[in-house]
Image (cartoon, rainbow, N blue to C red):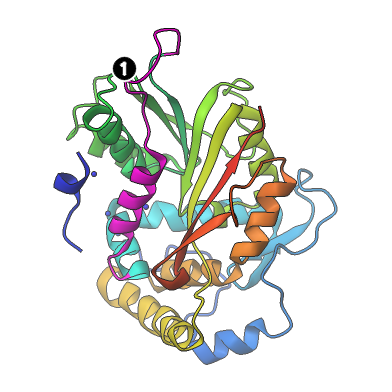
Amino acid sequence: MNAQSTRVLAPRQLLAAGKRSAGRAPQRCFSCSTRCRQGQQQTEIPRKDPRDGAGTTHFGFETVAEALKEQKVGAVFSSVASSYDTMNDLMSLGIHRLWKDHFVRNLNPGRNPLTSSSSEQKGWNILDIAGGTGDIAFRMLDHASTINNDAHTKVTVADINPDMLAEGRKRALETPYAPSPRLSFVEANAEKLDMIPDSSIDLYTVAFGIRNFTHKDVALREAYRVLKPGGVFACLEFSKVNNTLFEAVYKRWSFSAIPLIGQVVAGDRDSYQYLVESIERFPSQTGFRDMIKEAGFLVPGKGWEDLTGGIAAIHKGVKPT
């Protein structure tokens, strides 16, 4: 998971067959996955304490120990780090690039010096979580610089996976921001952002990452803690298609074609299988909106914007002033 229109690539991935976790079935089909899901709710499996690591959670359609999920998700993203765009192209039929552009334009990052008072802080302090490859961060900085004439907005890219961060640092060398203090990369767990002070962030973004978190509720509370009063939580994530016919076609594509393409193109069927299963297990638009509200955020309007019939959605929350 860049100014905008000039950096959008035509409609940002995957190696290492056999390096994925043991114990997963080698192949699954849509109908098999459907049977496997019967009786399951698309929410986290109940656990005693979200911080004690002693309970269980889901990894795709598997039930695993909480302590193991982080390792298994890490293995997936280490596998796909170098070809992350390709992965998202397959997951979204290439439309993810347009979604990301819209996501950033809608947030309008940066503080225009021509329209801001002299007493206001220069620039925004943005935290991009699970943004290892820099895909969203580069877009944010481009928008702030070219649209809002803001040379002070800065982005911290945080990711739990060092391979994703390495890919982001490499890509940053092709941008004007690599030698600049406006862009930094840090290895961090979204559920425990000890290095980020309370009430220090203007905008917290997470794109195509939160569905992989073990404790989404804990991550949301951390987002609330680090945001300034009036700060914005913004999430772009795969979601639930809102048309029955379109949903059937999309699920058939997701469960049948995507893992097969992953096997043929990247030699890594398991990573793609997990990713489509993780989408299916992610809460619905209303379910995730309610989680954001429970973390303390004010939710504008209905709480989300569907993209491409609900294949993805943008969720927002505002920390009360």
Image quarter of residue 47: bottom right
Q: Is residue 35 above or below residue 232?
A: below
Task: Look at the image and say whether residue 108 sits in the magenta stretch.
Answer: yes
From the viewer's perspective, tell me whether residue 240 is left or right of residue 15: right
User: In terms of image quadrants, where is residue 175?
Assistant: top left
Looking at the image, residue 123 sits to the left or right of residue 45; the answer is left
The furthest residue to the top: 119
Residue at 28% across, 56% down:
97
Give the percent coordinates (x, y) of residue 295. Answer: 71, 43
State the residue at coordinates (38%, 33%): 109
Residue 84 belongs to the span the image colors magenta: no
Residue 131 position by quadrant: top left
Left/right placement of residue 194 relative to residue 145 reads right
Q: Which residue is mark 1?
A: 113
> x, y (%) of residue 63?
69, 68
Q: Is residue 189 visible?
A: yes
Secondary structure under badge 1?
A: loop
Residue occupying the point 61% across, 67% down: 284
- Quadrant where the C terminus lies? top right
Q: Nearer the viewer, residue 12 or 102?
A: 102
Of residues 79 and 198, the one nearer the viewer is 198
In the image, what residue occupies the spot 34% across and 21% down? 115
Kind of residue indicated by mark 1: Pro
Q: Is residue 15 visible?
A: no
Q: Residues in magenta?
A: 93-121
Answer above or below: position of 49 versus 245.
above
Q: Residues within 10 Å of mark 1 (few under 14, many from 20)?
A: some
